[in-house]
Image (spheres, helix red, strand yellow):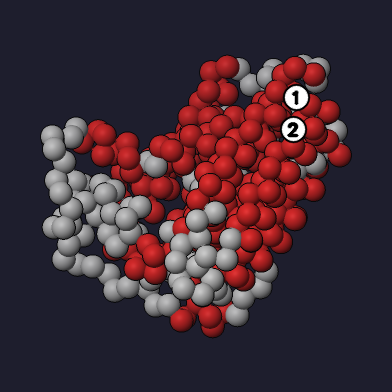
Amino acid sequence: MDIRVSEQATSATAIAAPEAITDGVEKAPFLSPPAQPRYRVVEYMLLLKPRVMSLVVFTALVGLILAPGAPGGLTPWTAALAVLCIAIGAGASGAINMWYDRDIDIHMRRTMNRPLPAGRLKPLEALIFGSVLSAGSVAVMALYVNVAASALLALTIFYYVFIYTVWLKRRTPQNIVIGGAAGALPPVIGWAAVTGDIGLGAIAMFAIIFLWTPPHSWALALFRRGDYEAAGVPMMPLVAGVRETKRQMLIYTGLLLPVTLLPVIIGMSGALYGVSALILGALFARHNWRVWKDTQGEQDGKEVAAARPMFFFSIFYLFLIFVALLADKVLFLPVL
């Protein structure tokens, strides 16, 4: 299931999405086959985007633990089942995303070796796999956890597949801004699994991930811009330019840093988290400033070198923000 000020709507049409590939999706002839046959179960696991799923699952787990009444609000079995449903739902939406994007994935170095563009699985297999897991995860969440968490999981899958993947990704440079809501929902689902509703703490965690997503995703776009250009995806650096992308990254970072202090303001977290958020925020801003000062690529169309370390640090940053939330809860706040 992996949040994203202004841009003219007509700008997105400057880069047209490529025609759907009918020959070559099943097998990419320019890719070398694997040295050894791979078990099909490995290919199905890759459809779930396990690296993305791991961060999604962790933020959902933190949302569940920080919810009022946790850990006593759920039995260990129900809590584990809720997290498993979130993981499966996130992976399932990733599989459907791969099915829909197989025509553009074949043009991108980062994605051309995925199971579908590389020809190791058939598109229909991925679609059925993702659809069955999506329906199953939502149904199990409704039956064994609660309807609120199930509805939020269904909304997340629908939003990621239809709003982000189908509607936004190929049409507007604001794709990851608007579509980023899907990636921000897992901690809200975890929270709702315990409480049956959405509280201020859940909203705070949602806001952190939502505002983190644009600088994170645009950092990737700055050093992988050639991939997006080849695939015809209208990412911000291609439509608005490198300088404007950097400017908007600074804006979102400026909004993100104070929002990370919301858990302290509303009383959900204490000093440990507050100090951690300030230190991590300063490091995040430092990386962003380095990207701003790196003028490479603004005129010559090259990739921005400073964006690569920022992208990888941004993943580490979000992980540590949620680690700090968890540590503050476990170590200092009373268990109810």
Q: Where is residue 49 in the image (x, y as percent from the top left)?
A: 39, 42
- Report the front residue among 81 and 30: 30
- Are the residues at dot 2 and dot 1 in contact (C-beta closer than 8 Å)? yes
Question: Quick one: SS at disc 1?
Answer: helix
Q: Is residue 95 left or right of residue 245?
A: left
Element assignment for label 2? helix
Whole-percent x, y for residue 236 in the image: 54, 68
Residue at (83, 36) in percent of width and height: 264
Q: What residue type is labelled 2?
A: Ser
Count all numbered tags in the image, as a single digit: 2
Residue 320 at what x, y percent from top left? 63, 33
Residue 70 seen from this side: no
Tell me if mark 1 has few (under 14), some (14-19) or many (20+) residues whose alpha carbon lies within 10 angstroms of its own.
many
Look at discs 2 and 1 and give the one toward the viewer: 2
Q: Which of marks 2 and 1 is nearer the N terminus?
A: 2
Q: In which quarter of the image is the C terminus?
A: top right
Q: Residue 63 carries which label?
A: none
Kindly identify the residue that appears in the image at 58 percent across and 61 percent down: 294
Q: Nearer the viewer, residue 52 or 216?
A: 216
Q: Mark 1 points at which residue?
A: 328
Q: Position of residue 85 (x, y in %)?
A: 48, 33
Q: Which of 282 and 109 is in front in this view?
A: 282
Query: Could you tell me which residue is drawn at 74 percent across and 23 percent down?
Result: 329
Residue 39 visible, this orientation: yes
- Would residue 238 appear left or right of 149 to someone viewing this image? left
Residue neighbourhood size for the residue with mark 2, other residues' Cα within 10 Å, grouped as few (<14), some (14–19), many (≥20): some
Type of the residue with mark 1: Asp
Q: Left of 82 or right of it: where is 105?
A: left
What residue would you read off at disc 2? 276
